[in-house]
Image (tube, rainbow, N blue to C red):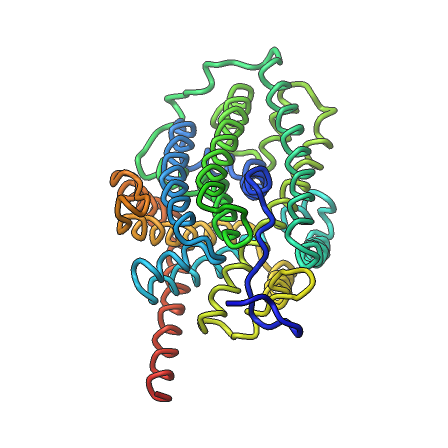
Amino acid sequence: MGEARAGGEPGELRRRLGVSDAVLIGLGAMLGAGVFAALAPAARAAGAALLPALALAAVVAYCNATSSARLAARYPASGGTYVYGRERLGPFWGHLAGWGFVVGKTASCAAMALTAGAYLWPGQAHAVAVAAVVALTAVNCAGVQKSAWLTRAIVAVVLAVLAAVVVAALSSGGADPGRLWDAGAGVSLGGTLQAAGLLFFAFAGYARIATLGEEVRDPARTIPRAVPLALGVTLVVYVLVAVAALSVLGHRRLAGAAAPLTETVRAAGADWLVPVVGAGAAVAALGSLLALILGVSRTTLAMARDGHLPRALAAVHPRTQVPHRAELVVGAVVAVLAAFADVRGAIGFSSFGVLVYYAVANASAWTLTSDEGRPPRVVPAAGLAGCLALAFALPSGSVLTGAAVLALGAASYGVRGAVAARRG
C-alpha cells in the first residue's frame, strides 16, 4: 500500500504516536464511565466478592493485554484482533472478531455518550449524547494527534476527580476496613464470574492501543510497553476506588447506589464533591467515547480494505491522514443509537462482543512461535478460558443478543463467500 492519494484513496496511515501518547489513549478508554457506573451492578452480582471479581477481571485483562501486545508488535496494522485472527486462524475468525468488535463497541459508544448526557443534563440526556458524538467525531476527523492531546487533558481531569473521591472516603470518620468483606452479603461462583464480566467492560480500553498499531512509532517496542503500563495504572486506580467505596458504603449500599461514587462522597461527609464527581463522570464518558470512536473506525478501515465492509470506507484523507469516511459512518451510526438506546442494555451486549473478540486474540497468540515473540503458553490459554467463562456468565439477555449478532456476522461472511465464488 502506498501513500494516500488525492481524493481519499486507500493508503497507509502516518506513524505519529509514541509510548506516552499510546498509554494515554489506553487510559482515556479504560478510565471512563465504567469506574463511575460499573461498581454497583458488579456489587449486586458479586455480593461480598466484589474485590475478588475485580481481581479476576484484571487477570483476564492482563492475559488479553499480553496476547494483544505480542500480536500487535508482530502485525502493526490498524484493525487489532481482526488482523490477528485473519493472519493466524483464517479469514473467518478475523471477520468474526472484527464484526464483534465493531458492533459491540458501537453499542458501547452509545452507552458512553448517554452516560455523559445523564450527568451533564439529565432531562435531555439523549440530545446531549448526540451532540457529544458529533463533536468528538469532528475531533477525530481533524487528526489522531489532536485526539491524543485531548485525551491527555481528559485523563488528567478524571484522575484528579478519582483521587479526590479516594482521599475523601479513606480519610473520613465513616471509613471502616471491616466493610471490605461482609460474609453476610453472600458469595457464589456464578455471581463472581458475572461481576467480573461486568467489570471487564471497564478494562477493555487497552485494545485501542493495538487497533492504532499503524499509527504508532516503532510498534514492536512501543505497543508491548504501552499496553501493560496503561493496564497497570488502571488496575491500581480501580482497586483504590473500589476499596474507598466499600469502606464507607459496604456491599449492600454500594449494590443499591444509582451513582456509586456520588453516594461514596456523600457517605464520607464531602457533599461539596458531589458536583465535582458528576462533572468527572461526564468528562470520563467523553474520554471513553473519543477513544472508542477512534478504535472502531480503525477496525472498520481494516475490514473495508479486505472487502468485509464497503471498500469506500477504506479511504484515508490526504491531508489529515485519518480514515475520514469510516469515522463519519461510525459517528453517524453511534449518533442514531444514542438518540434511542438504553445504557444498561448496551453495556451487557458490548461486554459479550468484546470478550469474544479477545477470545480470538488469545487463540491467535497461542499459534505464535517462540521466534515470533509468543508469550508463555499459560497466558493465551488462561485468557481464552477466562474470556469464554466471563462471556457466558453475563446476564442471559446479553448472551442471547450477542450470540445472535455474532451469528448474523457469520452469515454475512458466508453470503459474501458465496457471491465471490459465483462471480469467479
Nearer the observer, 382 or 80 = 80
Nearer the observer, 244 or 411 = 411
Tell me: 84 left or right of 344: left
Residue 38 location in percent, x, y?
52, 39
Furthest residue toward bottom: 423
Residue 201 location in percent, x, y?
47, 44
Judge whether 63 appears above or below 364 on screen: above
Tell me: 364 left or right of 333: left
Q: Is residue 112 visible in this depiction of the protein?
A: no
Question: Looking at the image, which residue is at 74% across and 46% down?
Answer: 121
Nearer the observer, 287 or 37 = 287
Residue 208 location in percent, x, y?
52, 48
Nearer the observer, 424 or 41 = 424
Numbered disc total: 0
Judge whether 35 appears above or below 358 on screen: above
Question: Looking at the image, which residue is at 62% across and 24% down?
Answer: 163
Tell me: 81 left or right of 280: left
Residue 120 sits in quarter:
top right
Furthest residue toward top: 173
Judge whether 239 appears above or below 150 on screen: above
Question: Looking at the image, which residue is at 33% across and 49% down?
Answer: 392
Q: Is residue 377 visible in this depiction of the protein?
A: yes
Residue 119 location in percent, x, y?
69, 42
* Quarter in which the C terminus is drawn: bottom left
